Image (cartoon, rainbow, N blue to C red):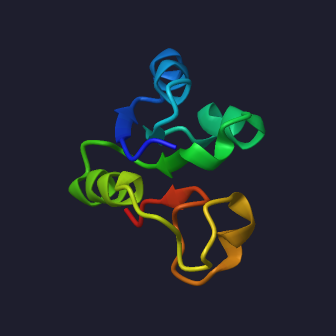
């Protein structure tokens, strides 16, 4: 597994697909939540991090960068989606902008 990660804005699916095929983690920033519906069923969904919001918003951009930062495990000690219920874990579920 690669320790590299990227942030892609605007949902750029072709770019995301190319990156995730190399084994990296990709945070995908998109204003339109339904545009990211495909992530949940993607074979590499555990390495795709949907971030809902405007990439021009500093808080959203920061959240995307923090979410994409390489780390061995989330708060639940897992790198897979089942930890999505862990309090404070935004790595395995869509993060929403508060604005």
Query: Which of the 4 image quadrants contains residue 67?
Result: bottom left
The extreme front residue here reads 1
**Residue depicted at x 24% and y 43%:** 56
User: Looking at the picture, does residue 69 appear above or below residue 76?
Assistant: above
Q: Is residue 48 visible?
A: yes
The one of 23 and 65 positioned closer to us in this rendering: 23
Question: How far across and down, in percent of the image, does residue 14 sit?
Answer: 52, 15
Q: Is residue 49 left or right of residue 53?
A: right
**Residue depicted at x 51% and y 80%:** 88
**Residue depicted at x 66% and y 37%:** 44
User: Looking at the picture, does residue 90 appear above or below residue 11?
Assistant: below
Q: Is residue 30 visible?
A: no
Q: Is residue 49 left or right of residue 59?
A: right
Question: How far across and down, in percent of the image, does residue 16 sit?
Answer: 49, 26
Question: How far across and down, in percent of the image, does residue 24 sit?
Answer: 46, 37
**Residue depicted at x 47% and y 65%:** 72
Q: Is residue 34 left or right of residue 65?
A: right
Query: Which of the 4 image quadrants contains residue 81?
Result: bottom right
Quadrant for the C terminus in the image:
bottom left
């Amino acid at each position: 597994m690669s320790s590299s990660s990227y942030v892609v804005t605007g949902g750029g699916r072709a770019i995301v697909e190319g990156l995730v095929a190399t084994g990296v983690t990709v945070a995908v920033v998109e204003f339109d939540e339904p545009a990211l519906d495909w992530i949940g069923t993607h074979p590499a969904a555990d390495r795709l991090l949907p971030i809902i919001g405007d990439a021009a918003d500093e808080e959203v951009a920061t959240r995307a960068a923090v979410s994409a930062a390489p780390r061995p495990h989330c708060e639940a000690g897992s790198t897979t989606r089942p930890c999505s219920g862990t309090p404070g874990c935004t790595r395995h579920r869509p993060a929403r902008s508060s604005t």
